Image (tube, rainbow, N blue to C red):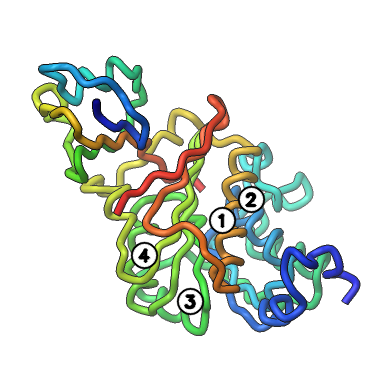
Amino acid sequence: MIKVNTEDYPWHAGMTVRALLDEKQFTFRHIIVRVNGQFVPEEEYEKYPIQDGEDVLVLHLMAGG
Amino acid sequence: MERYLRNYDAISEAEQESLAINRVLVLGCGGLGGMVIECLARIGVGHLRVVDGDLFEANNLNRQILCSTMNLNRPKTLAAKQRVMAINPLVEVDAVQAELTAENAAELLADCDVAVDCLDNIPSRLLLQQAAKTAGVPLVHGTVAGWFGRICVIQPGEDLLNLLYPDVGDAQGEELQMGALSFTAALTASWQAAETVKLLLGKPGLQGETLEVNLLEPSVRKIKIS
């Protein structure tokens, strides 16, 4: 099990940031991803592994006022 | 005082008197800033410094409470001052028709108890965070895109915006595609105003967290980010 934005989500072997984003249907263009507090640049989504028990944060990049 | 009768006992009379001597800086008088100013003036924050370099445009009419067909092409700060004078003349308004810059940031923050970030771009928001840190002033951050809103309270030195805007330079966010909706701005700004008043009154509020508002789902999530 991992945490995604504070909520439990089932983990599976081989899970990457990209796989998680696809599963969760996070399709927005501008997002910020942190795994255990570590910022993950977009170019690393395909290969960046997510381990069981990790804490993943997926937030919109937004700046409108 | 009759005008504040319905503030009691959500806040005490002593807290009401305390608010009257507080000073709040509101950066940006658009979708968020207009509603923040409205809320702070109505509750009775005594001194507001409102800052914006823009004039109203027709595309502000969908969401910016200070914008009307009567004041297009006029300064947002002027509308803010006139609005506050109309609803609560006890509130002193210092309207500054300017953009936030590295040169004027310290002067704008001077003597303020809280700064409210209602800006519309990432570089200015990061500049404000740095200036507020230097000045020792807590910051109430708010931002919107479409159906989504976010609120954070940033104590001097916490640098939470570096976590929300990591290495993004002057990029723009989801608001480019999603636009901005009236109720999202009003809700997010109201929450900013509430956090501002709690800071002023020493009441517990957001700490090291982001409050993520999703009006489509709908949901509100409080997420620890530091």
Q: Can you tell which of label 2 and label 3 is closer to the viewer?
A: 3
Tell me the amino acid under the disc marked 4: Gln
Residue B62 point in image, percent of width and height:
66, 37
Tell me the amino acid under the disc marked 3: Leu
Q: Answer yes or no: are tags 2 and 4 on the same subunit.
A: yes
Residue B204 point in image, percent of width and height:
52, 64
**Which label's residue is closer to the chain start, 1 or 3?**
3
Q: Which dot marks residue B129? A: 4
Tell me the amino acid under the disc marked 1: Gln
Q: CA distance from mark 1 to mark 4?
A: 16 Å
Q: CA distance from mark 1 to mark 3?
A: 19 Å
Q: CA distance from mark 3 to mark 4?
A: 13 Å
Which element carries disc 1, helix, strand or loop? helix
Q: Can you tell which of label 2 and label 4 is closer to the viewer?
A: 4
Residue at 87% across / 69% down in the picture? Answer: B3
Residue B86 point in image, percent of width and height:
83, 66
Q: Which dot marks residue B192? A: 1
Chain letter of the residue beneath label 2 in the structure image? B
**Which label's residue is closer to the chain start, 2 or 4?**
2
Residue at 31% across / 64% down in the picture? Answer: B158
- Closest to the observer: B142 or B97? B142
Which element carries disc 4, helix, strand or loop? helix
Q: CA distance from mark 2 to mark 4?
A: 26 Å
* Residue at the spot of label 2: B56
Which element carries disc 2, helix, strand or loop? loop
Q: Can you tell which of label 1 and label 3 is closer to the viewer?
A: 1
Chain letter of the residue beneath label 4 in the structure image? B
* Residue at the spot of label 3: B108
Residue B226 visible? The answer is: yes
Which element carries disc 3, helix, strand or loop? helix
**Which label's residue is closer to the chain start, 1 or 2?**
2
